[in-house]
Image (cartoon, grey):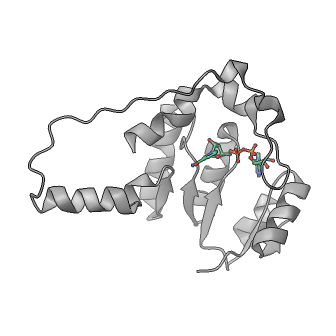
Amino acid sequence: MALEGAFDIDADRARTFVGEFGGRLYAELEAVLADPGVAIVANLTSVSQHYAVTKATLLAGKYVYSEKPLAPVLEQATELVELAKERGLLLSSAPSTVFSQAAQTLFKAVGDGLIGTPRLAHGNLDMGALAFMPYSEWRGRRGVPWPYWDEVPNGCVMEHAGYQLG
Ligand SMILES: NC(=O)c1ccc[n+]([C@@H]2O[C@H](COP(=O)([O-])OP(=O)(O)OC[C@H]3O[C@@H](n4cnc5c(N)ncnc54)[C@H](O)[C@@H]3O)[C@@H](O)[C@H]2O)c1
């Protein structure tokens, strides 16, 4: 399966992404959804956009892999799951750690009875002293800023609890 292309409401972001990874530059989401060559949409938008983009994609009859959380509100996430079921479409969400070699090895070991019956799983999340870090200046390889304006109001728990659950 090949990358067909990318769309971003910030055209420069999409342009540099396609420049690095290849594929077509889409001018709008509707163009992505209308493209018969697109089978799966990876919804990598900001948290507040996950629900709307995933819903539009499912309504267009395409599979979705969404960044976490699936939606910021449980009712919206439930609606998306129901919509995907109704339409016979696959819907999945980050984190995908469950598919990692470590997790799969562990599942096999448990399934084969190699380590007995697990009784307790414990996860601990420590984000460190974020308030004291220069996060407003953090940049990725392509100069893209870390989106603290989206991450901080949503909260670190909402952003990262999924890793512990996954
Ligand atoms: N799984 C992981 O390891 C991991 C790591 C970092 C971030 N995330 C998640 O990825 C998502 C994005 O995080 P980020 O750090 O890349 O944020 P970001 O702000 O750098 O990127 C989000 C992009 O989405 C675009 N966008 C916003 N609304 C859109 C819309 N309606 N249609 C099209 N494009 C739209 C923005 O212009 C921006 O370029 C968040 O949900 C975050 O929780 C996951």
Give the image quarter of residue 8: bottom right
At x 33%, y 56%, the residue is 103
Total number of numbered labels? 0
At x 38%, y 39%, the residue is 165
Closest to the observer, 104 or 79: 104
Residue 116: where, in percent of width, then height?
Answer: 8, 49
| Left/right of residue 160 with respect to residue 36 in the rendered view | left
Closest to the observer, 64 or 143: 143
Q: Is residue 113 above or below residue 62?
A: above
At x 47%, y 64%, the residue is 89
Closest to the observer, 75 or 96: 96
The N terminus, quarter of image = bottom right
Residue 105: where, in percent of width, then height?
Answer: 28, 62
Residue 116 appears in the figure:
yes
The C terminus, quarter of image = top left
Residue 25 appears in the figure:
no
Q: Is residue 123 above or below residue 6?
A: above
Q: Is residue 100 above or below residue 82?
A: below
- Give the farthest residue toward the right: 12
Residue 117: where, in percent of width, then height?
Answer: 10, 46
Residue 42: where, in percent of width, then height?
Answer: 62, 60
| Left/right of residue 163 with respect to residue 148 in the rendered view | left
At x 9%, y 58%, the residue is 113
